[in-house]
Image (cartoon, coloured by chain):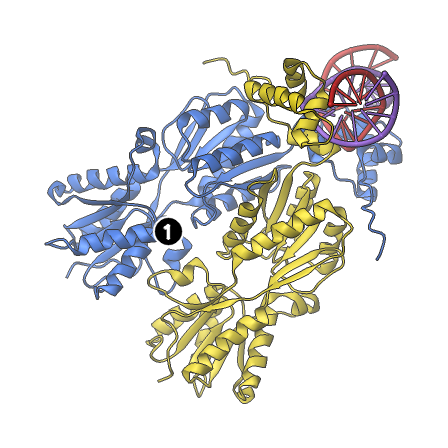
Chain colours: A blue, B yellow, C purple, D red
Amino acid sequence: MEVPTPPRRVTIVDVARHAQVSTTAVSKVLRNAYGASPAMRAKVQQAITELGYRPNAAARGLRGQTYTIGVMLPDIRNPFFPDIVDGLTDALRDTPYQVLLGPGGCNDEHAEACVTEAMIDRGMDAMVLVAPISPRSHLEHIATSVPTVVVGRHGHSSWYDVVSDDDQAGAALVVDHLVGLGHRRIAHIEHAETDPDRLAEMPNAIRAEGYKQAMRAHGLGAEIDIVSTTYTQEGGYVGARQLLARPERPTAVFAGADVVAMGVLEAFTEAGVSVPEDISVAGYDNTTFAALGPVSLTSVDQAGHHIGAETARLLLDRIADRNRPSVQVKLSPTLVTRHTTAPPP
Amino acid sequence: MEVPTPPRRVTIVDVARHAQVSTTAVSKVLRNAYGASPAMRAKVQQAITELGYRPNAAARGLRGQTYTIGVMLPDIRNPFFPDIVDGLTDALRDTPYQVLLGPGGCNDEHAEACVTEAMIDRGMDAMVLVAPISPRSHLEHIATSVPTVVVGRHGHSSWYDVVSDDDQAGAALVVDHLVGLGHRRIAHIEHAETDPDRLAEMPNAIRAEGYKQAMRAHGLGAEIDIVSTTYTQEGGYVGARQLLARPERPTAVFAGADVVAMGVLEAFTEAGVSVPEDISVAGYDNTTFAALGPVSLTSVDQAGHHIGAETARLLLDRIADRNRPSVQVKLSPTLVTRHTTAPPP
DNA sequence: GTGAAAGCGCTAACAA
DNA sequence: TTGTTAGCGCTTTCAC
């Protein structure tokens, strides 16, 4: 009905003309680069405001930076990720950088590769890979073409920085807490893992290892009882049913992730087992789920916001100096006790 | 330690040289454009594979398209959004388009504007705005510079397409269900809204309206009881406490969103009110929360995946023809009954 | 301190 | 059908 003509965007040339200076001058002002007098800066700034000019990031990227940080999220549903993203965006608020999220297909190596490639094609200045499942070689491949920080996956590389939580310590927090309450038969539900890379680097594997070590440290090596399923609600349900079928039931279950704990709680409710009266349950990640009124799950908090902030720091650092040696940051988790853990019956 | 030289990326020129053709030819093959013989196509394809060439999206964007769809998510924590994104990416799987997500600060008009602007600066070929809170004028401003689909917000415009759920019908589903169970005193917890734009267009307002109409349709106009808080767990908690303080308590509560229902359940547990024995509770959105074992909440399902797929269709359509008249698609919700609703005591 | 000019990787007119 | 050429909007030498 009206004129459907998309109005031509204001370019750097328009600004230059309006301010009666060269495009070079405008560019310098835009980037706060050296070689522009205060007077010129003022003139240009005014023209920018008057015309409502916004630089075309794609065009900038062709020569310099796009001022865009790509974050690969393998599973947007994972309620632990938003905290990291928040920490990242908050830390980047007063920088010219913009965060864009790439949805990797859940637990799909191919989809993960697709989205990371796509982000590189789009000229991201840096990449954040959150709990990637891709093989190390692919992570390093990415890191060679763009500054990269890997989050939530252990194992360091000289090609990328790593920010993770101390999952071993997190598992110990849970075991210590349960033992402190008087539990001895503490079972663990883990995510089955066979790939050797991932066995050494993925949080789930480290948590299981931490559980075993902590049990031994308490002289409970003989009580170690691990059920291997998956980090899903279904996995928790299946695992819990297996535990209920034990000749001697555990008095506490440490689920490797909050979603797993949800499945456990469901199975227990179904079987008429009261939590925490009959059996205690603890999760990991302190997700939104855990805090929900009807759930109120004891869980390990990974300080996702802090992880995100730390990631931002490393990112800017490496954009500034691509050749600095790689860094590995490990943060300490804390335990949030709620209503699903209590002394054994 | 090793050579930290990022290897120069393969460009269209490299491919052209390697295949002994012009860059134009390569470009045509890339875009499946008219004017390339099968023989040439084969040659070019082979060169592309051999060199591992990937087009630079930023450079493409400078002349043509970036093949990128920007999705603005005002709140990454909202568990309803992932379904939409999944539907979108699934529908776009076999197209050259890539979806990137922009995290808008939760309920923050300014942050929302920032992220949409940033996406336009980065040359997105189209934008999807999911449940935006920005004023209509801003939405239309966006739509004039890039094809836009607004999702989950009613009110049509000639500038952008709209895909939403029939929230009025959804509210009626809940009321019908509860009345069918024998309830009469059915209360509703809504998200307080004063802005006239949003009052007419935001789902929360429509749901409240739908509740009222459905109550009247059942001859229960006198029983209409609305508490105005916010669509948060806290809001649900506060609302539920108010309802408990009523001289005559409702026998059922229709929470406008699942998170709200979580707060309601928490307050009820705290007050020793059993659900569904004493009071029934229903939510909206059928989020992951609702399906959690310990929650098992009756909720309205919006078919997010379907919404996403429909959005993709409209998007591609409008990219192909920017001048086609705008469309409004309204999908029908369904009710998922679980264990929080039962006949009144 | 300032600006002219070249070029980033690609697409789109236009000639051949 | 093919290739030549001129930009897209920006940054970056490098003269002045």
Tell me the chain of label 1. A
Q: Is the residue A268 above or below the residue A184 in the image?
A: below
Q: Amino acid at mark 1?
A: Asn
Dot 1, crowdedness within 10 Å: few (<14), some or many (≥20)? many
Q: Residue at x 33, y 79 (%)?
A: B277
Task: Kindly tell me whether residue B209 is visible in this rendering.
Answer: yes
Would residue A20 be found to the left or right of residue A180 on screen? right
- Quarter of the figure with residue B167: bottom right
At 38% across and 74% down in the image, what residue appears? B268
Q: Left or right of A220: which side holds B133?
A: right
Q: Is residue B327 above or below residue B269?
A: above
Q: Is C16 above or below relative to A99?
A: above
**Which of the 4 quarters of the picture holds residue B213?**
bottom right
* Residue corresponding to mark 1: A286
Q: Nearer the viewer, residue B180 or B324?
A: B324
Residue A4 placement (x, y as % from top left)? 82, 51
Taking B152 as reference, is A310 left or right? left
Point out residue A139 in the picture as x, y percentages from the top left corner.
Answer: 45, 28
Residue B40: % across, % down: 67, 21
User: Residue at coordinates 83% horizontally, 42% vertically from top-left?
Assistant: A51
Across and down, in percent, residue A26 comes to: 79, 30
Quarter containing the C terminus of chain A:
bottom left
- Is residue B74 at least partly visible in the picture? no
